[in-house]
Image (cartoon, rainbow, N blue to C red):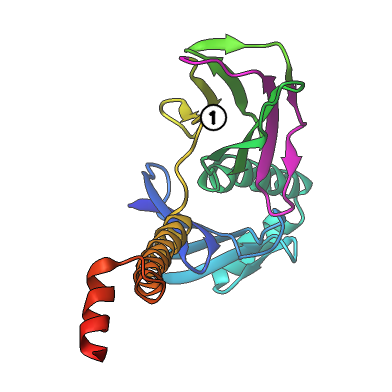
C-alpha cells in the first residue's frame, strides 16, 4: 500500500509523490488551495479502498469522520491537544519545504546604460535582476573577468508584492578600449552563474534600423532628383544665354 501526498498550488500546477507505508493501510493526501498568501488550506484525508474514513481541515481546525471507525478516531484526535499542535507543525513543514520550493524562480537579468561617459563625468551602468525567489542572491560586477568593488552602489533586495524579488546595482566607470564589463548573478535556482556582458555601442533595435534604412533611401532619392533637376536647369540656362554654341547655332539656323 502507498501513501500518496498531493500538493496543489493552483489550478494548473500539481506535485505528486508516493511513499511506501509499512505500518498502515491508509492514503494520506495533502491539499493546498490556491490562495493569495501562504496560509493555504491544509487537508489530510484517510481513505481505505477508495472510501473516505476521516478528514482533517486546517480551516476548521479539527477532524471529521465519515464512517463508524472514522467518527471514533476523529473524536479521539479532536480531544487530544498534542494532535492539534502536530497538525500546525505539519502545515508549516509542508508549506516551507514543498510549496515554497515549488515556487522557486530563476532571476531574469538586464544590463543597461543609464548615462554615457563624457569629458567631465563617467558612465553609469545599471544591472537589474527581476522576479526571483527565494530572496538570497549574489550580484557581482566584473571587469575583464575580475570582480569590481569600487564605485559600485546596490539597492536592497526589493519585494515585488507577489512573492518574488528584484535587486539593482549601479557601476560608475570611464570605459577604455579593450575593456569588457559584465554583471554576474548567482542564485540557488541557477546551476551556473548568469552572466550579462555590457556592449559599449549596443546594436540598435530592429525597428530603429528599419526607420534609418527607410530614411536613408528617401534621402538618396531626394538628392538624386535634386541633382538631376539642377543639371537640367543648368543646360537650359546655358542655351538661353548663348553659352552653349552648338545649341545656339541650331536655334540661329532654324530661325533663319
Residue found 69% across the figure and 43% down from its top: 86
Q: State the residue at coordinates (56%, 72%).
A: 68
- Give x and y (percent) for residue 110: 56, 40
Q: Is residue 125 above or below residue 252?
A: above
Q: Assign the C terminus to one quadrant of the image.
A: bottom left
**Residue 134 seen in the figure:** no
- Residue visible at 70% across and 60% down in the picture: 58
Above-or-below relation of 60 to 191: below
Front-most of 38 and 55? 38
Residue 8: x and y in percent read: 52, 60
Up-down: is 28 above or below 224?
Answer: above
Mark 1: few/some/many CA within 10 Å (<14, 14-19, 20+): many
Q: Residue 59's image quarter?
A: bottom right
Which residues fall within the magenta stretch? 153-178
Expressed as whole percent of the image width and height from the top left, the position of residue 105 reads: 53, 44
Q: Secondary structure at mark 1?
A: loop
In the image, 63: left or right of 27?
A: right
Residue 160 forms part of the magenta stretch: yes
- Specify whether residue 86 is in view: yes
Looking at this rendering, what residue extends furthest in the bottom direction? 255
Q: Quadrant of residue 100?
A: top right
| Location of mark 1 (residue) | 187
> Compared to 131, does 187 lie above or below?
above
Would residue 154 be counted in the magenta stretch? yes
Amino acid at each position: 500500500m502507498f501513501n500518496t501526498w498531493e500538493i496543489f498550488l493552483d489550478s494548473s500546477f500539481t506535485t505528486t509523490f508516493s511513499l511506501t507505508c509499512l505500518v498502515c493501510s491508509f492514503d494520506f493526501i495533502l491539499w493546498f488551495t490556491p490562495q493569495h498568501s501562504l496560509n493555504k488550506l491544509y487537508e489530510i484525508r484517510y481513505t481505505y479502498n477508495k472510501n473516505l474514513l476521516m478528514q482533517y481541515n486546517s480551516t476548521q481546525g479539527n477532524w471529521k469522520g465519515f464512517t463508524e471507525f472514522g467518527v471514533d478516531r476523529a473524536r479521539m484526535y479532536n480531544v487530544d491537544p498534542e494532535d492539534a499542535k502536530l497538525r500546525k507543525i505539519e502545515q508549516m513543514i509542508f508549506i516551507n519545504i514543498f510549496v515554497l520550493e515549488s515556487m522557486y524562480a530563476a532571476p531574469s537579468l538586464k544590463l543597461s546604460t543609464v548615462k554615457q561617459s563624457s569629458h567631465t563625468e563617467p558612465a553609469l551602468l545599471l544591472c537589474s535582476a527581476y522576479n526571483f525567489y527565494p530572496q538570497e542572491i549574489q550580484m557581482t560586477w566584473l571587469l575583464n573577468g575580475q570582480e569590481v568593488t569600487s564605485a559600485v552602489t546596490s539597492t536592497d533586495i526589493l519585494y515585488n508584492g507577489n512573492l518574488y524579488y528584484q535587486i539593482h546595482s549601479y557601476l560608475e566607470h570611464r570605459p577604455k578600449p579593450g575593456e569588457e564589463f559584465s554583471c554576474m548573478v548567482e542564485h540557488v535556482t541557477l546551476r551556473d552563474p548568469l552572466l550579462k556582458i555590457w556592449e559599449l555601442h549596443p546594436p540598435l533595435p530592429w525597428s530603429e534600423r528599419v526607420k534609418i534604412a527607410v530614411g536613408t533611401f528617401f534621402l538618396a532619392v531626394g538628392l538624386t532628383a535634386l541633382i538631376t533637376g539642377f543639371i537640367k536647369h543648368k543646360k537650359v540656362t546655358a542655351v538661353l544665354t548663348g553659352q552653349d554654341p552648338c545649341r545656339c547655332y541650331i536655334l540661329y539656323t532654324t530661325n533663319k
